[in-house]
Image (spheres, rainbow, N blue to C red):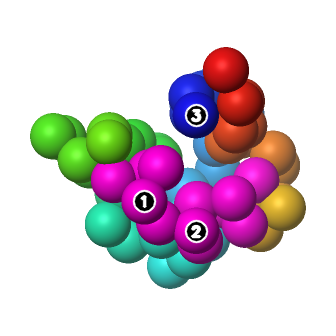
Amino acid sequence: MRITIDRDRCIGSGQCVMTAPGVFTQDDDALVALVPGHEDAAAADPRVRDVPMGCPVQAVAIHDD
């Protein structure tokens, strides 16, 4: 699983953080980011797959490699 984030699209709604807080966070500008050091947690957290659908601007995408 690979996660891509389009920070230019992100509006800081925080839906990603509320859905999968162990994987996503927001930076000082409230833009989405992966929790440092927890990138591997994405594969273990089934809620990660719900994040793209919950993002109002589709700034997060999940790719199965």
User: Does the stretch in magenta take in 32?
Assistant: no
In the rendered image, residue 8, in percent from the top left (x then y), is placed at 64, 26
Element at label 3 = loop
In three-dimensional space, the C-alpha distance between marks 2 and 3, rounded to whole angstroms, equals: 11 Å
Residue assigned mark 2: 46
In the rendered image, residue 19, in percent from the top left (x then y), is placed at 56, 76
* Residues drawn in magenta: 41-52
Residue assigned mark 1: 44
Q: Is residue 52 visible?
A: yes
Q: Looking at numbered disc 3 in the image, what kind of residue is underneath it?
A: Met
Left or right placement of residue 22 versus residue 57 in this view: left
Q: Earlier in the sequence, mark 1 or mark 3?
A: 3
Task: Give residue 61's quadrant in the image.
Answer: top right
Looking at the image, is 5 positioned above or below residue 15? Answer: above
Q: Nearer the viewer, residue 13 or 48?
A: 48
Residue assigned mark 3: 1
